[in-house]
Amino acid sequence: MHNVIARIARDQPECELGWMRATLIILHRWTALVVGVILLGTAASGASLVFEGAIDRGLHPELWTAPPSGALLSIDTMVARVEAKYPQGKVGAVSLSPVPGRAWTMSAGGLTVFVNPYTGNITGTRTAQESQTTLSRRLHVFHVELFAGRIGRTIVGVATCVALFLVLTGIILWWPDKLIRISTTASWKRINFDLHHALGIVAALILIVITASGLVIHYDALTNAIRSLDAAPPAPAPQQAAGNGGALQSFDALAAAAHGALPGATIMFISNGGAKNPATVAMRFPEDRTPGGRSRVFIDRYTGVILGNVSTRNAQTGTRIDNLKRSLHAGDVLGKPTEALWFLAALVMVSQIVTGFAMWWNARRARR
């Protein structure tokens, strides 16, 4: 009797673990099946959005291509040419290319005007509606909200939570056997099984980063929690003093003032502001991988006086972490190498849905 009791006591933890594992497998499987189609779409679109800008430039080279030929023209010279050709709208903002050989863009009224910064030639224009219908923009909207507005955003947020749950439970289910080999000589069912486990665990860390950063982007409560790590709240954005009827500062003057305020940073975007908003210059330090940069310089649009600035190099802890969320989600964090890895990881997520469905289908047929 003593031996029987001892064996039951010894086997009880294993029974409990077996029950927990079986329950986790069911949750993992059916959660993936229910949300699989949405995850398939968001992962596939997310993979393409790693190269969002390159897609548009590749599809419309006539707009974006500007072969280097001598020195760059002054911004004001290009603005004057755009306003001369499109007098119906003053240029209110200029986007500068971070690399040579690429056109700059200017917002003039309702038009986006593409300008060769070496010659001043206008390579083309886009209306606001045309900008919204480009492939890269459609992919972005689909990835964020499934073309369904607020409801779509809610669905994508839930799907992102599910994706993180699937990655974490996948690691737990993989851990006891630690399968990471692919038997190429086995049946296709076994190969499919091996691919699901091996690819999933190899990409797991990156997928955790992608899904976790996606949740921070999606849910303001998480962003606010991260920013609460700052020792003090950020200073309010400065306001533009009422104009005195004088002329606005030129774009070149705004650029010079911004360079003086944040030396070492590259200008990405200049806006000459509005009635209540000062001129704003978006800048990016070399270590900042976000496309538009996270540093800002605020300038009085009439006098050229620096009203304040926000530098990523002086940011507090919470703001520094929050500044990383976009780079971590899109793969910009270390440039081209991480973009390639993030692209492959997103494709792995697609393969997980496909191989997981095949595993469920094979088991279903076997039970029948």
Image (spheres, rainbow, N blue to C red):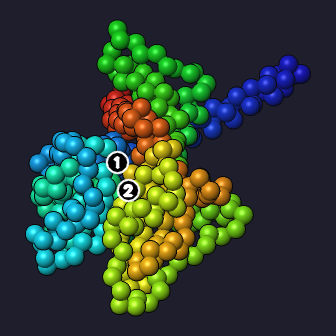
Tell me if residue 109 comes above or below residue 174 in the rendering: below
Three-letter code, disc 2? Met
Horizontal relation, residue 21 to residue 239: left or right = right
Q: Is residue 56 visible?
A: no
Viewer-side residue, 230 vs 4: 230
Q: Where does the image place residue 148, in percent across and percent down from the top left?
A: 29, 66
Q: Where does the image place residue 223, in percent across and percent down from the top left?
A: 56, 62
Q: Which residue is mark 2?
A: 268
Tell me if residue 171 comes above or below residue 299 in the rendering: above
Task: Tell me whether circle 2 and circle 1 mark residues in contact (CB < 8 Å).
Answer: yes
Tell me if residue 97 comes above or below residue 67 in the rendering: below
Q: How much space separates mark 2 and mark 1, taking CA atoms?
A: 7 Å
Three-letter code, disc 1? Pro
x 33%, y 71%: residue = 250
> In the current view of this chain or complex, which residue is farthest to the right?
2
Horizontal relation, residue 72 to residue 7: left or right = left
Q: Is residue 67 visible?
A: yes
Q: Which residue is mark 1?
A: 98
Tell me if residue 191 comes above or below residue 340 in the rendering: above
x 42%, y 32%: residue = 337
Viewer-side residue, 50 vs 203: 50
For residue 177, what is the image quadrant? top right
Q: Where does the image place residue 343, in percent across and percent down from the top left?
A: 36, 37
Tag 1: Cα neighbours inside 10 Å, few (<14), some, or many (≥20)?
Answer: some
x 79%, y 25%: residue = 10
Please identify the quadrant where the N terminus is shown. Answer: top right
Tag 2: Cα neighbours inside 10 Å, few (<14), some, or many (≥20)?
Answer: many
